[in-house]
Image: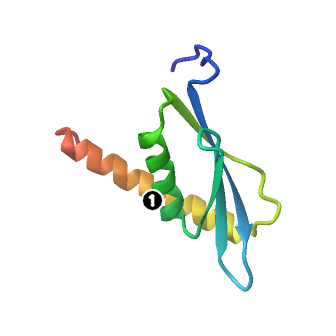
Amino acid sequence: MNTDPIEDGTLLKLTAEIYSVDPEGFVITVKNDEKNESVSCNSAREYAEYIIESVNNSQRDNFVAEWLPSPHARKVDIDMIGMQLGMMQEWMEEELGEGNGMV
C-alpha cells in the first residue's frame, strides 16, 4: 500500500451522504470537489456510475470517495446501499478476473 502523501491539487475528492425519503427510499447526495457540483442519485447503481464517470473524466491523478455521517438516513437504507455496492464490487472483480484469465 502506498502511504506517500498526495500533493494538493492532484486529488479528486468525492463525498456522499444518504438521505432517507418517506415513505421509503433514499437519495445519495454526492459532491465533486473538482467540478464544485453536487448531484443527487436515486440508487446505489446511479451513485456508482457517477463515481466512475467522475474519475474517468477527472484531470486529477488520484481520487478518494468518502461517506459523510448521514444522520437523516434510516439504518435499513444504509444497509441496503452497502449490500448493493458490495454486490456490484464483487461482480466487477469477477468480470475483471475473467478478462485477465484469472478465476
Q: Quadrant of the C terminus?
A: top left
Q: Residue at x 48, y 26 (%)?
A: 61
Q: How far across and how far down the image is residue 75, in percent? A: 73, 67
Looking at this view, name the residue that lies furthest to the left.
101
Q: Report crowding for label 1: few under 14, some 14 to 19, many 20 or more residues within 10 A (C-alpha).
A: few
Front residue (pair 30, 97): 30
Q: Residue at x 48, y 63 (%)?
A: 45
Q: Is residue 99 left or right of residue 20?
A: left
- Residue at screen point 36% across, 55% down: 91
* Side of 71 relative to 42 (left or right): right
Residue nearer the viewer, 9 or 64: 9
Residue that protrudes farthest toward the right in the picture: 71
| Among the 4 quarters of the image, the one containing residue 3 | top right
Where is residue 74? Give x, y as percent.
75, 69
Q: Amino acid at mark 1?
A: Met
Please say which color scheme the image uses: rainbow
Is 62 placed above or below 78 here?
above
Residue 30 placement (x, y as % from top left)? 64, 54
Tag 1's secondary structure?
Answer: helix
Q: Furthest-top residue in view?
A: 4
Please tell me how many numbered marks the rendered image carries: 1
Which residue has dot 1 on it?
A: 87
Determine whether 76 is above or below 49 in the image.
below
Q: What residue is shown at x 67% (from left), y 63% (from top)?
A: 78
